[in-house]
Image (cartoon, rainbow, N blue to C red):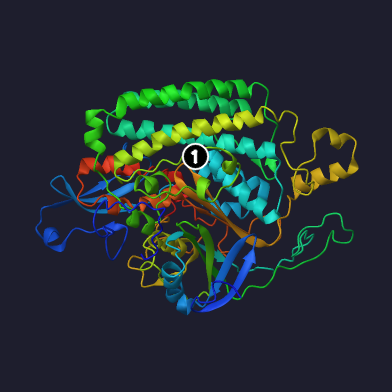
């Protein structure tokens, strides 16, 4: 039970590192966002972070040093303990970092999960500042936002191929064109 | 917006909202005016001496009136966040400071703090106080660069030389502590990279004694200067509601009458132990932003002095955590301890590992709320790093601030939003 039970489309609530994460159903994102703004007072959208979890946990993480309870470096046999990170429900996570500028300042992370071919509703009607954040997520991660009035690339050229922050986009993947080649 | 808190001063700077619709960041010329044929579209930048870096503004002009405006960014995009995914955690620290090359210490700190949050590391008090001190010196540095260049753009050339005179002193202090003038990489996960050198405290004291007089000088030149007042007063209005809706933070938000400062409202480092005021002005124009910047510099000097008071009594205390899985062992131990040698080897070659999880840390950088989101899969490299760059968000407000503005005001308005293009484009 938490104070956020009333959020529409709520899937789960996580408390980690003194941060609250609300996972909501992507189809009800606008409802959840409006509820958080109007009922809970989260009037300020700090940031939208898109994360690509392609290949997550495919390379086993060896020598894992943590347990959910905390780190215990001195306990024998935990060194070299093999652990695989917890699986993720879909490929992309969108994290909306919200802040309440009020007498009782607090933060919350609104999280939705989408797959490659799925899109998510734009939150510009709720927080106008989402405009450029969503364009950035589209540009670098290739996530589509329904209802965004101007969903074009923002940091890269308009004719750029691919979305560089995706995990299947190589580092140094920019084609180098030499003169005389054309 | 329904959530009205009493701490927020709601002086109506203007009625209703001025955020353009449907695109909140693009000011469109009205259709009848556009059809009249009297509109001239000018491409302002990306290489123009008064746009604060490689910012391109597509401006529709009707005579001298700005009727349409669109900001185009991305000319400095270097893929910092992608690069960081391919570097070990401790090599990554060099990247954030290059993102915002004017407030490097703050950027460095926010990344280090996010990693420390995932690691759940305890930081020694000496490191905390020194970080606070350097972040505040860095704030003064950043505000000085802002003041010098913004005034220069409005024709006050001498202001630039005065501001850079004091900036030079701050850079000398950074050099004294860290060995570098900019991009110092002095914050290490766990504390500081090196102990504070002897001779730093008296030099910093000298600077603190001098700086308030220097700020008096600046204010003599500008605060009641008739030309300055005419160029800045009542220009670039942004109401409190619009500022919050557009995600504005830092001096821009406080100059619109919103009493919000992460240092005060969500204290980090040693800010809950120092005494300082948060300057808030209700006017919401370029002049208010200028005055907030000036007042903040004075407060920063006070914070630096209080940090020095504490640090001077911390001689000999540890400056970095003793967690050997994360922090390099002291050099002398490598010759005598096998264990230390192994730790050293592991950290240098493979890097330390950060437990799986995600964290978001927000601090008050000179430009506003600087956030850092890090995600780790438990390995030695970050899975994802994202910066919430206050300059990027500040540029979203250009269209709103430029409502009913003249072309000459544009320089003052864009300057007052205090953007650093490196941070916008990352």
Secondary structure of the residue carrying tag 1 is loop
Residue A22 percent across, percent down from the top left: 55, 70
Horizontal side, residue B24 vs residue A136: left or right: left
Mark 1 surroundings within 10 Å by alpha-carbon count, few (fewer than 14), some (14 through 19), many (20 or more): some
Residue at left offset 53%, top offset 69%:
A111
Residue A85 percent across, percent down from the top left: 70, 68
Q: Quadrant of the N terminus of chain B?
A: bottom left
A101 above or below B341? below
Residue B259 percent across, percent down from the top left: 42, 48
B246 above or below B157? below
Horizontal side, residue A38 vs residue B365: left or right: left
B189 above or below A32? above
Instruction: Decide which of B11, B211 is in the foreground and name it.
Output: B11
Horizontal side, residue A66 vs residue B133: left or right: right
Residue at left offset 42%, top offset 53%:
B7
Instruction: Decide which of B179, B197 is in the foreground and name it.
Output: B197
B75 above or below A137? above
Q: Can residue B117 be seen in the rendering of this structure?
A: yes
Instruction: Decide which of B219, B66 is in the foreground and name it.
Output: B219
Q: Which residue is mark 1?
A: B101
Total of numbered circles in the picture? 1
Mark 1 chain: B
Residue B326 percent across, percent down from the top left: 75, 48
Q: Can residue B181 be seen in the rendering of this structure?
A: no
Q: Give the quarter of the image for residue B412.
A: top left
């Amino acid at each position: 039970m938490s104070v956020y039970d009333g959020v529409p489309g709520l899937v789960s609530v996580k408390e980690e590192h003194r941060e609250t994460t609300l996972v909501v159903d992507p189809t009800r994102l606008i409802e959840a966002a409006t509820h958080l703004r109007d009922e809970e007072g989260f009037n300020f959208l700090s940031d939208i972070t898109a994360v690509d979890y392609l290949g997550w946990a495919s390379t086993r993480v060896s020598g894992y040093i943590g347990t959910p309870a905390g780190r215990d470096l001195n306990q024998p046999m935990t060194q070299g303990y093999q652990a695989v990170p917890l699986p993720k429900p879909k490929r992309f996570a969108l994290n909306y970092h919200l802040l309440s500028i009020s007498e009782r300042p607090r933060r919350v992370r609104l999280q939705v999960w989408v797959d490659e071919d799925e899109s998510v509703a734009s939150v510009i009607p709720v927080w106008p500042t989402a405009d450029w954040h969503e364009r950035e997520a589209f540009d670098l991660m290739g996530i589509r936002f329904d209802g965004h009035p101007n969903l074009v690339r923002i940091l890269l050229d308009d004719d750029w191929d691919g979305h560089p922050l995706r995990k299947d986009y190589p580092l140094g993947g920019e084609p180098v064109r030499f003169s005389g080649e054309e | 917006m329904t959530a009205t808190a009493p701490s927020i001063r709601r002086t109506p700077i203007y009625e209703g909202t001025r955020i353009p619709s449907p695109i909140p960041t693009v000011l469109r010329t009205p259709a009848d005016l556009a059809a009249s044929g009297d509109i001239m579209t000018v491409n302002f930048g990306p290489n123009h001496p008064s746009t604060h870096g490689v910012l391109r503004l597509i401006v529709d002009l009707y005579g001298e009136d700005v009727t349409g405006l669109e900001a185009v960014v991305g000319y400095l995009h270097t893929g910092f966040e992608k690069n960081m995914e391919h570097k070990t955690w401790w090599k990554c620290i060099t990247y954030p400071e290059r993102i915002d090359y004017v407030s490097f210490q703050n950027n460095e700190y926010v990344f280090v703090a996010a990693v420390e949050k995932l690691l759940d590391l305890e930081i020694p008090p000496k490191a905390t106080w020194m970080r606070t001190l350097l972040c505040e010196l860095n704030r003064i540095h950043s505000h000085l660069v802002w003041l010098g260049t913004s005034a220069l753009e409005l024709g006050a050339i001498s202001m630039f030389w005065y501001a850079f005179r004091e900036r030079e002193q701050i850079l000398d202090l950074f050099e004294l502590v860290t060995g570098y003038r900019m991009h110092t990489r002095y914050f290490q996960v766990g504390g500081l990279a090196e102990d504070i050198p002897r001779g730093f405290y008296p030099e910093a004291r000298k600077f603190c004694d001098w700086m308030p007089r220097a700020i008096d000088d600046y204010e003599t030149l500008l605060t009641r200067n008739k030309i300055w007042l005419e160029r800045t007063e009542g220009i670039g209005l942004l109401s409190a509601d619009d500022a919050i809706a557009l995600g504005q933070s830092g001096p821009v938000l406080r100059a619109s009458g919103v009493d919000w400062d992460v240092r005060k409202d969500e204290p980090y480092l040693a800010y809950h132990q120092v005494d300082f005021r948060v300057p808030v002005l209700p006017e919401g124009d370029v002049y208010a932003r200028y005055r907030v910047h000036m007042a903040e510099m004075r407060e920063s000097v006070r914070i630096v002095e209080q940090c020095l008071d504490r640090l001077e009594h911390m001689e000999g205390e540890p400056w970095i955590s003793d967690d050997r899985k994360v922090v390099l062992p002291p050099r002398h131990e490598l010759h005598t301890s096998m264990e230390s040698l192994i730790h050293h080897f592991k950290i240098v070659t493979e890097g330390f590992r950060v437990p799986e999880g995600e964290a978001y840390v927000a601090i008050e950088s000179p430009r506003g709320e600087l956030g850092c989101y890090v995600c780790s899969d438990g390995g030695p490299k970050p899975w994802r790093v994202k910066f919430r760059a206050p300059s990027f968000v500040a540029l979203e407000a250009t269209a709103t601030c430029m409502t009913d503005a003249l072309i000459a005001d544009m320089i003052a308005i864009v300057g007052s939003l205090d953007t650093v293009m490196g941070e916008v484009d990352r």
